[in-house]
Image: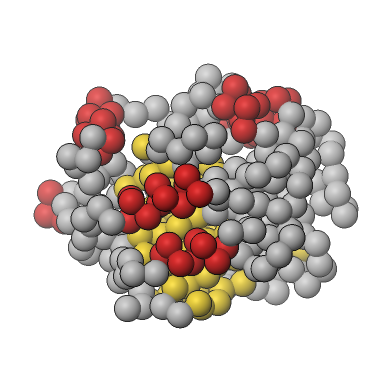
Amino acid sequence: MPKLLFHPLDRRQFLRISLLGSGLLLSAGLDATAESADGRGRTFDLGLLSDPHIAASSLDSFRGFFPTENLIRAVAQVMSTPTQAVLVNGDLARLTGMLGDYEQFKRLMGPVSEKLPVLCSLGNHDDRRHFRQSIRTVIGVPQTVPEKHAVVFQDSVVDVVVLDSLNLVNDASGLLGEAQLQWLSSFLMLPSTRPAVIFVHHSLGEGKGHLLDSGRLFQTLEGHPHVKAVFHGHSHVWKVSRRGRLWVVNLPSVGYNFSNDQPVGWVNARFTRTGVTLKLHVLAGNREQDGARESLPWLS
């Protein structure tokens, strides 16, 4: 069993991230080759896993699905693809974010975390205190947002901004909060030549059960044309839509679906400077779209 969930940083990566934290360098992701240091001509493959809902017991099941078995299969598939990093977009734990849930999650993610950077957001079934107690090492640059787990991971191809929408444990509604939105606004005003994408766990509808301040989030993103997409989970639905110039990507659940017409699986996102191609990998549920691709050009 690995001692840490996340892939350890070598000295060069640590120095890059330290400089980034001081605002002196904007490159804390994977190394680019010398001839493509600005990211042009490169691709960045990010494995996107959402809503695994892992319980301490590997026998836990829901709606006939076994989340532990699904995550084991997803990890094996990720390791057989050209994925360069992985992001798990919230609801890592089954219901109330118990310590045993995170220890099991950490164990299952071991084959990935020993080789690749792993980022996590938090959802409504997570517990921030237990998450931090169990998972101690963070890839990317943790942001100074009180009581929130916000992280920035920057590759020469794309900036990945991971927000924390956990409000109350096991309460379906999410909240970014004023402090996190103010930080996001300040961060997006920093000079950058790369596209940026936002990750948040909660769905972006209106009212209870969704992200309660989703309107404020989209207001914050206005005026920042380098922000190209918002990715979320929570609803256990696979869907791609648009909101103005922004792509909105609803990630499927790794753990289980709520509706029989939905896939259970994960998505590989291949980013370039001009867009992203999404490939769906179905583990269970509706398998009709297994291998389906969505090519999303960045919009102005």
Residue found at x 44% / y 73%: 246
* Left or right for 265, reference 132: right
Please tell me which residue lies in front, 212 or 286.
212
Q: Quadrant of the C terminus?
A: bottom left
Instruction: Tell me how many marks there are.
Output: 0
Q: Is residue 115 above or below residue 2?
A: below
**Location of residue 19 by image quarter:** top left
Which residue is outermost to the left? 35
Colouring rule applied to residues: secondary structure
- Provide residue 75's location: percent of width, then percent of height: 59, 44
Identity of the residue drawn at 73% across and 39% down: 169
For this orientation, the residue located farthest to the top is 3
- The foreground one among 237 and 82 is 237
The answer to whether one can see residue 39 in this image is: no
Residue situated in front as seen by the camera: 266 or 111: 266
**Residue 164 visible somewhere in the drawing:** yes
Residue 73 to residue 272: above or below: above
Name the residue: 60% across, 43% down: 122
Residue drawn at 50 percent across, 61 percent down: 217
> Would you place residue 222 above or below residue 264 in this image?
below
Task: Give the side of residue 147 with respect to residue 24, left or right.
Answer: right
Nearest to the observer: residue 226 or residue 269: 226
The image position of residue 129, as x and y in percent, is: 63, 27
Apparent side of residue 68 relative to residue 136 in the rendered image (left or right):
right
Q: Quadrant of the N terminus?
A: top right
Tell me where residue 37 appears, x and y as whole percent: 16, 52
Q: Position of residue 237 (x, y in %)?
A: 69, 66
